[in-house]
Amino acid sequence: MFDRIFAADDPAEVSRVAHSTAQALLARVRADGSGEVVDRLVSFTDAHGIDDIAELWSRSPARTLPGALWRLYLLQLMIHDDPQTAALLYERGRVQLDSADPVVAGAPTPAGPEELVELIDTILRGLFQGDFAVALDRAAAFARVQAAGATYLADDYDATEAERASTLTTRALRLSTYAADLTTCATLWRRDALT
């Protein structure tokens, strides 16, 4: 089915399936009161990813349910793939950023690689077990702290390693965009308008 949809020329069909899978996943996992399905899902995505479904979601507009899930999946992947860099960026952003974002994100101070992996998994669990909008707000705050860290680190490298500074600046822009999208998605969820 995915091969047929990915090859489809009809964007409406791709969008329909992306929205259907996002809604079905969210409804199924949130319906389980025991938390076992959430634990299995977070463990499964950590070990195996959900590449086919996430690929489908990646084609969705940013401010939709599948678009929000895609951005959260990317954040989880980023942290799990390189927790050391994530911790460096987070700590730099936490120190430099003059906002409540580090508190909203909920990482300990200081946050090491293991703590950030645990934090992103906790945020994902919150999507399915807690208040969905709060989990989106936490993810947005986390992304803003990371973006600030990447920006400040890029400034440090600008004079000596221009290519690395450029990579960090690109990462900061992407994370800032994710943060804005996730904040808007949280607002839409609270209004019952995130589809």
Image (cartoon, grey):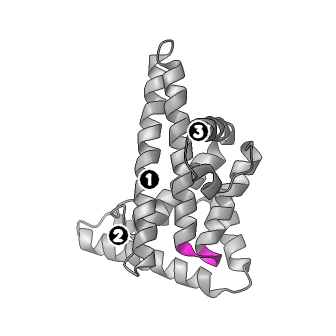
In the picture, the quarter occupied by the N terminus is bottom left
C-alpha distance separating marks 2 and 3? 40 Å
Q: Is residue 39 left or right of residue 130?
A: right
C-alpha distance separating marks 2 and 1? 26 Å
Q: Residue at x 41, y 82 (%)?
A: 192
In this figure, which residue is indicated by the disc labeled 2? 5
Residue 97: image location, x then y, percent = 56, 40
Q: What stretch is highlighted in magenta?
A: 128-132
Pick whichever, 88 or 47, lies toward us: 88
Q: Tag 3: Cα neighbours inside 10 Å, few (<14), some, or many (≥20)?
A: many
Question: Where residue 178 is drawn, which disc sits there?
Answer: 1
Identify the amino acid type marked 1. Tyr
C-alpha distance separating marks 1 and 3? 16 Å
Earlier residue among tags 2 and 3: 2
In this figure, which residue is indicated by the disc labeled 3? 93
Q: Tag 1: Cα neighbours inside 10 Å, few (<14), some, or many (≥20)?
A: many
Identify the amino acid type marked 2. Ile
In the picture, the quarter occupied by the C terminus is bottom left
Q: Residue at x 41, y 40 (%)?
A: 173
Earlier residue among tags 1 and 3: 3
Residue 114 drawn in magenta: no
Numbered disc 3: secondary structure: helix
Q: Is residue 153 above or below residue 53?
A: above
Pick whichever, 181 or 29, lies toward us: 181
Q: CB under 8 Å between callouts 1 and 3?
A: no
Report the magenta stretch's main SS. Answer: helix
Q: In this view, does 131 lie to the left or right of 177?
A: right
